[in-house]
Amino acid sequence: MKYFTEFMLYALAIMVFIGSLSFGFDREMARRDYERYKTSQQEKIVGCIFESNCNYYNDLLDKEYD
């Protein structure tokens, strides 16, 4: 039972690390799209893995256009 608990803790740590890493990469890609689109006033940021990243930068674009 001890080894199973230890294994589960390591597995959880790895999943949290991978989730955080993918969230960071996704956020950076949304930021790059934001930088590109903020001058064009034509497009919305789409295709994010985490919808909150797209929503955050789309809200910033909407504030700039108002």
Image: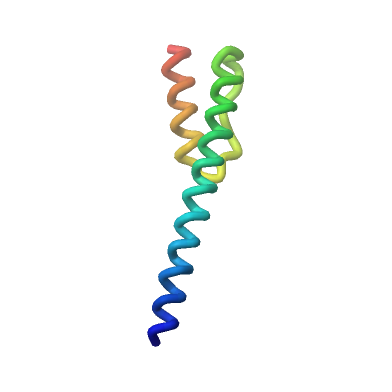
| Residue 7 position in % (x across, y down) | 46, 75
| 6 relative to 40, above or below | below
What is the quadrant of residue 37 in the picture? top right
| Of residues 66 and 14, the one drawn nearer to the viewer in this rendering | 14
| Residue 22 position in % (x across, y down) | 54, 47
What is the quadrant of residue 45 in the picture? top right
Q: Quadrant of the N terminus?
A: bottom left
Residue at the location (49% across, 53% down)? 19
Is residue 25 found left or right of 20 in the rendered image? right
| 61 relative to 55, above or below | above
Residue at the location (52% across, 48% down)? 21
Is residue 41 found left or right of 53 in the rendered image? right
| Of residues 65 and 12, the one drawn nearer to the viewer in this rendering | 12
- Total numbered circles: 0
What's the coloring here? Answer: rainbow
| Residue 14 position in % (x across, y down) | 49, 61
Q: Residue furthest bottom?
A: 1
Q: Quadrant of the C terminus?
A: top left
Residue at the location (42% across, 17% down)? 63
| 26 relative to 45, above or below | below
| 35 relative to 19, above or below | above
| Residue 43 position in % (x across, y down) | 60, 22
Residue at the location (50% across, 41% down)? 24
